[in-house]
Image (cartoon, helix red, strand yellow):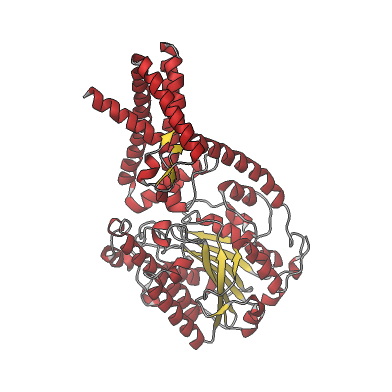
C-alpha cells in the first residue's frame, strides 16, 4: 500500500509538471517526458536539512498546485473562448459564468457546480502538496540512492536535450513548467503594457471632431437598424453539418427580401473575440477600436470615443434606441454608445419563459421593438441597436417562429419552451450541438428578416452581423474568427454607396468576399455614407 501511494504521488507530481494547457496537446508522448524541474527539485530537496526541506516541499507543492489550476483554466478558456486564461483580466468573467449557469441550470444546480469547483481546487492543492512532501521524505530516507538517481537523470536529460531526442514527435527532455511560468510572466507584462498603449490609441479618432451636420449625410431620413446575432459565425455558413440548413435559410430570406423590394450585400468581418464575451465584439464594431480584452473595454467605455451609434445621435437627426434582451441589470454603457433610451429585459414586457440563457425569443424582442418604438408616430427616423440572443449557447431549447399577431406578451411560448430539447441532451453531443446551433441561427435570421419584410418600408436600412464564432466544440479547433455581415436596404442608392466594397449580393457572403477586421467597419461605413473626417 505504501509503495502504491508513493507511486501515485510521483505520477501526480510528474503530471502537474508535464500537463499541457491546450486540449489538442493532450497526447501520451507529452506526459511521458523527463522534466528538468523534477531533477532540479530533487537535487535541492536532497541537500536541504529537515525543516527547510519541509518548507521547500510545501512551497513547491503550492506552486505546482497553482500552475495546475491555471492550466485547467487555460483548458476551459481555450475550449470556450479560443484563448488561454489571462491572470490579470479574466477574474471578472467568473461572475458572468455564474450568471450564465444560473440562467441555464437554475440556482440550485449552480450552487452545486460552484461547490464542486471549489472542492476540486482545494483537492488539487492538497494532493499535490502532500505528494511533494511524501517524495521529499523518500529522498531524505534514501539519500545515497536518490543522489545517484538524480545525477543519472540529469545526465540523461542533458544528453537528450543536446541531441534533440524525440518520441512521437515530442522532445523527451522537457522544461515545460519553466516555460509555462515564463509565458505567464510575459503575458502579464504584455497585458500591463497593452493597457497603457491602448489608452493612447483610444484618444485618437478620425471623426472625433466632425460636426453633426457632416456625419451620415447620405442616410438622412432612413430608419437604420444595427442588429447583432449572437454567435453567428462563419462556421454556420461553411460547416458541413450546419451549413445546409443555414445556407438554405439565407437564400430563402434573400428571395423574400427581393420580393418585398429589398436588396442585400454581404461580406466578412474578423471579430475581436471568439466563443463568448459578446460585448467585446459589439464595442469593436461600434467604436472602430480593437477591443480584445476586458481592460480595453473598460478603457474605451469610460471615455468619449465616438461610436457608430453615437455618430447617429450627434447628428440630431435620429432618435437612438437600444433593444437589449440580454441585459438584466442597469447598463451604464448605454450613455457611451449614444443611445437615447435602452430597453433591457425588464422593460420589454415579456411574460413568457426563458429559453435557457436567452431571456426571451428574438421574435418577441422584435415585436416589442415594433410596439414600443418603431410602430409609433415619430418626428425623427430611428437608429436602433438590437441584440438578438436566441442563438446563445447552449442552443436548447430553441423558440419557434409563430405568426406575428400571436406573439402578444410572450406567454404563448410556454408550450414551445416545454416541448423544446433540454440543454443537457444537446450541449455535450458534438453532432447534436452543431445541429441545434445551426437551427438557432436559422431562427434568429428568420425572425430579423421577417420583421423587416413585414414592418419595414422604403426608408428601412438594416445592418446585421454576428458578434463572434461559437465555441470550439461547434466551430472546430483553430477556426477563424470571421463572422458574416450584411446590409439590407429598400432604396437602391444605399447599396450603391458600398458598391466598391466587393461584397456578395444577397445575405450569404461567398468565400471570395473580402475579410476585414471588425474595427475597420466604423470608418468605412461613416465614409461611405457622407461623413467628413475631423481628427
**Relative to 441, residue 142 above or below:** above
**Relative to 146, residue 524 above or below:** below
* Image coordinates for residue 303, horizontal then vertical, percent: 67, 50
Between residue 283 and residue 473, name the one nearer to us.
473
Can residue 466 be seen in the rendering of this structure? no
Between residue 14 and residue 381, name the one nearer to us.
14
Can residue 35 be seen in the rendering of this structure? yes
Quarter of the view holding residue 141: top left
Between residue 96 and residue 296, name the one nearer to us.
296
Q: Quadrant where the N terminus lies?
A: top left
Quarter of the view holding residue 402: bottom left
Quarter of the view holding residue 16: top left
* Image coordinates for residue 451, horizontal then vertical, percent: 47, 76
* Image coordinates for residue 208, horizontal then vertical, percent: 74, 59
- Taking the spot 49% from the left edge, 44% from the top edge, the residue there is 85
Between residue 236 and residue 180, name the one nearer to us.
180
- Taking the spot 29% from the left edge, 25% from the top edge, the residue there is 6
Amino acid at each position: 500500500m505504501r509503495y502504491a501511494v508513493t507511486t501515485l504521488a510521483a505520477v501526480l507530481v510528474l503530471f502537474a509538471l508535464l500537463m499541457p494547457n491546450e486540449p489538442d496537446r493532450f497526447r501520451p508522448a507529452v506526459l511521458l517526458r523527463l522534466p528538468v524541474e523534477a531533477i532540479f527539485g530533487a537535487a535541492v530537496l536532497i541537500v536541504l536539512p529537515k525543516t527547510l526541506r519541509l518548507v521547500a516541499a510545501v512551497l513547491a507543492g503550492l506552486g505546482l498546485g497553482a500552475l495546475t489550476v491555471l492550466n485547467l483554466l487555460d483548458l476551459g478558456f481555450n475550449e470556450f473562448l479560443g484563448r488561454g486564461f489571462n491572470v490579470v483580466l479574466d477574474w471578472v468573467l467568473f461572475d458572468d459564468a455564474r450568471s450564465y449557469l444560473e440562467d441555464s441550470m437554475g440556482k440550485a444546480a449552480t450552487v452545486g457546480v460552484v461547490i464542486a469547483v471549489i472542492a476540486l481546487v482545494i483537492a488539487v492543492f492538497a494532493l499535490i502538496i502532500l505528494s511533494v512532501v511524501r517524495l521529499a521524505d523518500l529522498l531524505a530516507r534514501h539519500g545515497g540512492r536518490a543522489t545517484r538517481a538524480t545525477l543519472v537523470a540529469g545526465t540523461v536529460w542533458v544528453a537528450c536535450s543536446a541531441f534533440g531526442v524525440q518520441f512521437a514527435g515530442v522532445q523527451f527532455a522537457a522544461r515545460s513548467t519553466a516555460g509555462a511560468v515564463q509565458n505567464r510572466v510575459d503575458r502579464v507584462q504584455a497585458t500591463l503594457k497593452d493597457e497603457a498603449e491602448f489608452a493612447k490609441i483610444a484618444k485618437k479618432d478620425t471623426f472625433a471632431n466632425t460636426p453633426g451636420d457632416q456625419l451620415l449625410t447620405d442616410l438622412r431620413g432612413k430608419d437604420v437598424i444595427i442588429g447583432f446575432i449572437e454567435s453567428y459565425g462563419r462556421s454556420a455558413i461553411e460547416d458541413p453539418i450546419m451549413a445546409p440548413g443555414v445556407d438554405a435559410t439565407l437564400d430563402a430570406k434573400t428571395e423574400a427580401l427581393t420580393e418585398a423590394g429589398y436588396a442585400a450585400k454581404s461580406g466578412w468581418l474578423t471579430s475581436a473575440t471568439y466563443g463568448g464575451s459578446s460585448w467585446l465584439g459589439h464595442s469593436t464594431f461600434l467604436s472602430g477600436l480593437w477591443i480584445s480584452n476586458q481592460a480595453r473595454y473598460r478603457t474605451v467605455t469610460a471615455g468619449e470615443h465616438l461610436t457608430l451609434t453615437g455618430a447617429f445621435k450627434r447628428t440630431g437627426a435620429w432618435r437612438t434606441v437600444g433593444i437589449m434582451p440580454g441585459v438584466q441589470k442597469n447598463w451604464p454603457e448605454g450613455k457611451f454608445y449614444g443611445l437615447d433610451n435602452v430597453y433591457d429585459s425588464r422593460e420589454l414586457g415579456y411574460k413568457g419563459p426563458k429559453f435557457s440563457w436567452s431571456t426571451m425569443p428574438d421574435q418577441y424582442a422584435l415585436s416589442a421593438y415594433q410596439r414600443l418604438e418603431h410602430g409609433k408616430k415619430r418626428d425623427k427616423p430611428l437608429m436602433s441597436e438590437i441584440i438578438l440572443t436566441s442563438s446563445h449557447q447552449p442552443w436548447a431549447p430553441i423558440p419557434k417562429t409563430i405568426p406575428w399577431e400571436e406573439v402578444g406578451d410572450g406567454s404563448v411560448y410556454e408550450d414551445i419552451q416545454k416541448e423544446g430539447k433540454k440543454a443537457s441532451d444537446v450541449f455535450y453531443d458534438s453532432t447534436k450541438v452543431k445541429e441545434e446551433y445551426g437551427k438557432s441561427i436559422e431562427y434568429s435570421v428568420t425572425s430579423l428578416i421577417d420583421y423587416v419584410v413585414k414592418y419595414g418600408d422604403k426608408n428601412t436600412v438594416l445592418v446585421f452581423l454576428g458578434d463572434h464564432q461559437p465555441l470550439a466544440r461547434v466551430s472546430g479547433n483553430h477556426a477563424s474568427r470571421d463572422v458574416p455581415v450584411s446590409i439590407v436596404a429598400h432604396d437602391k442608392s444605399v447599396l450603391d454607396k458600398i458598391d466598391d466594397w466587393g461584397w456578395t449580393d444577397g445575405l450569404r457572403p461567398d468565400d471570395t468576399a473580402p475579410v476585414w477586421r471588425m474595427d475597420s467597419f466604423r470608418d468605412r461605413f461613416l465614409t461611405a455614407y457622407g461623413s467628413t473626417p475631423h481628427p
